[in-house]
């Protein structure tokens, strides 16, 4: 008797996910016509949260690198956007260049930071972030904590500006997500998954652990930089404290822990959930942050795989397929 | 110049006090407690409430808070850390960072944004100073803080090397499974170690409150100073923390002389230099660093 094995990557669940994502993309792209300027601003916020969550999850969940200082890339990208725009570059071009600068900064940082272990790496990144914060404050253009604005955006009308920012944010988010999913489905992705599951085991079968971690780190740097530059384009004010502040790390931690560490789907769900919670509860100020912290710690202790760790295994196949599905068919 | 050198040494004494608890917890439990700074600030508010609101003399308030923070640390380990460290290396980092966020904002809600200081509780001592030859004045409090740091490190080192509890803590940190086979209650030992680490935070809080004032969100700055002192000093003996703290203080003092904003920047640069030196120990040239990158 022969047993036929069929190897597939997608499935019904993946097709449903693609449809949901497609509908979400169309809705987000049409936001300027449906919800106007205010709606577009909120849509950019959602996309920035998705970027931050997916990138932080790629770092912590896949590469096992918990960084308290991803605000390094977030803040520096916002700063370079201001600087480049001040030098006469079109603000949207400045955003795109800043993403490149973020990736370059990620490469340089990875050369020495990746040799630090766990907690040392976590706070080491925080030190780098506050170093960058202090250096940005020295720039006369920024005027210390007073900050400045992305004035050159004013050449566009407010409707034009918010719509362009939203579409750029949408395009960048899709591009970053696509790069991540393609990466996860490639040979590097197999290495990443192996490191996630067992780092020492991965090393023993010949996986280039540091090289693989570096790829993820640079991608996360670029994606987080994109989020920072886009947040600037949406808020238009640059106050260093608002970009280098540790609350961003708290948000990333919350989104990823609640959504599900080590799963792209989890990070996206976490970001959407955070967006909803923020919309309703952000006005509670410090109590809101206390609540976020309590929920994040409870998830870390009681449900460390997050919501997707509960939902995912109950679905047939993967929602965003990164592995292979092997089915046995008897003739 | 001489007075700046002396002040740097005294500042180093303060950083040593800050960093001892963090280093102790890291060396005996392999956990970097990201809430270390927040717990110091919490202890500070405890001292403030006892001293200013209830009129307890500062020495008695310190003793009470050492007891309180020991219990807090014990419970912290039982409820959070023991569970988190069972789930891999990442969860303790995530959990302690979450606790820091909770504590920071909770303290802001309870105590408000105003700065608090313990200096009014010690009267004249707050500005009393020793006079050295050459018209150099050094604050008595800074000298006490440095002394407290040295005594605290000495006491912890003695405890680790000479007492049964110290041997139990070392055994638990080296190999938990074997330690528990030998009949050591590893959970209890680790909880006691956490309690001790948090109790040292009371000394740090006293030092902070007597030197200057603090606000509810100042924990992260204290954590960064403590962490930098630990990394610069290197892991091994707690005495290295003292060396690291001195180097950090010297770097900051020199930076402050170069530029008004240079104080924090050069402290961070000293931390980076320490990371580079440690990399250099494995492959000492920037070229090989760029070619092959960092190795784990």
Image: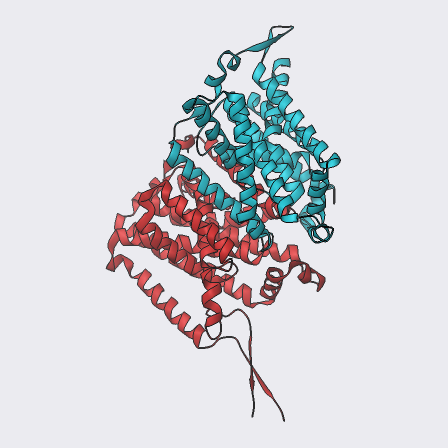
Give B165 or B294, whichever is nearer the viewer.
B165
**Residue found 39% across the figure and 66% down from its top:** A21
Chain coloured cyan here: B
Q: Position of residue B68 (x, y in %)?
A: 52, 34
Q: Position of residue A316 (x, y in %)?
A: 47, 75
Asked whether, in this view, residue B14 is left or right of residue B53, the answer is right
Model colouring:
by chain
Q: Position of residue B52 (x, y in %)?
A: 43, 22
Is residue A192 in view? Answer: yes
- How many numbered marks appear? 0
* B31, above or below A133, in the image: below
Q: Quadrant of the N terminus of chain B?
A: top right
* A319, above or below A138, in the image: below
* B18, above or below A38, in the image: above
**Residue found 55% across the figure and 24% down from its top:** B207
Is residue B8 in view? Answer: no
**Residue found 36% across the figure and 51% down from its top:** A45
Q: Colour of chain A?
A: red
Give B246 or A142, whichever is nearer the viewer.
B246
Give A146 or A253, whichever is nearer the viewer.
A253
**Residue found 60% across the figure and 19% down from its top:** B144
Of all residues shown, which one is farthest toward the top?
B134
Q: Quadrant of residue A15?
A: bottom left
Q: Position of residue B76 (x, y in %)?
A: 54, 44
Of all residues shown, which one is farthest toward the front?
B183
């Amino acid at each position: 008797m022969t047993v036929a094995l069929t190897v597939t990557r997608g499935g019904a669940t993946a097709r449903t996910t693609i449809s949901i994502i497609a509908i979400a993309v169309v809705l987000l792209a049409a936001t300027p016509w449906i919800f106007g300027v205010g709606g577009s601003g909120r849509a950019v916020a959602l996309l920035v949260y998705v970027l931050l969550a997916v990138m932080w999850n790629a770092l912590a969940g896949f590469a096992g690198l918990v960084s308290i200082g991803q605000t390094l890339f977030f803040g520096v990208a916002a700063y370079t956007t201001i600087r480049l725009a001040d030098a006469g570059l079109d603000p949207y071009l400045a955003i795109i260049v800043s993403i490149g600068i973020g990736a370059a900064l990620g490469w340089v940082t990875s050369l020495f930071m990746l040799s630090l272990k766990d907690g040392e790496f976590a706070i080491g990144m925080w030190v780098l972030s506050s170093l960058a914060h202090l250096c940005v404050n020295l720039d006369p253009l920024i005027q210390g904590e007073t900050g400045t604005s992305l004035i050159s955006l004013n050449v566009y009308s407010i409707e034009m500006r918010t719509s362009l920012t939203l579409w750029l944010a949408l395009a960048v988010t899709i591009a970053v997500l696509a790069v991540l999913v393609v990466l996860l489905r490639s040979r590097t992705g197999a290495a990443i998954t192996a490191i996630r599951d067992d780092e020492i085991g991965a090393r023993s079968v010949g996986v280039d652990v540091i090289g693989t971690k570096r790829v993820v780190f640079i991608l996360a740097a670029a994606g987080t930089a994109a989020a920072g530059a886009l947040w600037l384009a949406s808020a238009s004010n640059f106050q260093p404290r608002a970009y280098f502040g540790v609350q961003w790390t708290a948000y990333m931690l919350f989104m990823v822990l609640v959504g599900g560490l080590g799963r792209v789907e989890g990070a996206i769900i976490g970001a959407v959930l955070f967006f909803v919670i923020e919309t309703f509860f952000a006005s509670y100020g410090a109590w809101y942050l206390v609540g976020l912290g309590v929920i994040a710690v409870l998830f870390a202790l009681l449900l460390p795989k997050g919501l997707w760790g509960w939902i995912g295994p109950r679905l047939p196949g993967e929602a965003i397929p990164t592995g292979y599905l092997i089915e046995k068919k008897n003739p | 110049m001489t007075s700046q050198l002396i002040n740097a040494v005294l500042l180093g004494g303060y950083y040593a006090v800050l960093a001892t608890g963090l280093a102790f917890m890291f060396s005996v439990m392999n956990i970097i407690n990201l809430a270390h700074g927040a717990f110091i600030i919490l202890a500070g508010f405890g001292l403030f409430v006892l001293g200013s609101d209830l009129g307890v003399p500062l020495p008695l308030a310190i003793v009470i808070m050492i007891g309180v923070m020991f219990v807090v640390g014990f419970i912290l380990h039982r409820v959070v850390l023991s569970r988190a460290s069972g789930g891999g290396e990442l969860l303790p980092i995530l959990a302690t960072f979450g606790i820091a966020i909770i504590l920071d904002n909770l303290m802001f809600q309870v105590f408000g944004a105003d700065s608090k200081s313990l200096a009014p509780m010690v009267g004249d001592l707050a500005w009393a100073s020793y006079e050295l030859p050459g018209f150099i004045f050094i604050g008595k409090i800074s000298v006490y803080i440095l002394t407290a740091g040295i005594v605290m490190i000495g006491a912890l080192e003695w405890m680790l090397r000479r007492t049964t509890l110290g041997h139990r803590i070392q055994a638990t940190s080296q190999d938990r499974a074997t330690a528990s086979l030998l009949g050591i209650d590893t959970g209890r030992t680790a909880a006691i170690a956490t309690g001790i680490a948090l109790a040292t935070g009371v000394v740090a809080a006293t030092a902070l409150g007597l030197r200057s004032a603090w606000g509810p969100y100042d924990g992260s700055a204290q954590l960064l100073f403590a962490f930098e002192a630990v990394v610069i000093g290197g892991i091994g003996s707690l005495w290295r923390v003292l060396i690291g703290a001195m180097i950090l203080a010297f770097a900051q003092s020199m930076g402050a002389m170069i530029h008004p904003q240079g104080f924090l920047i050069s402290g961070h640069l000293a931390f980076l230099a320490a990371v580079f030196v440690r990399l250099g120990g494995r492959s000492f040239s920037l070229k090989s660093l760029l070619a092959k990158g960092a190795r784990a």
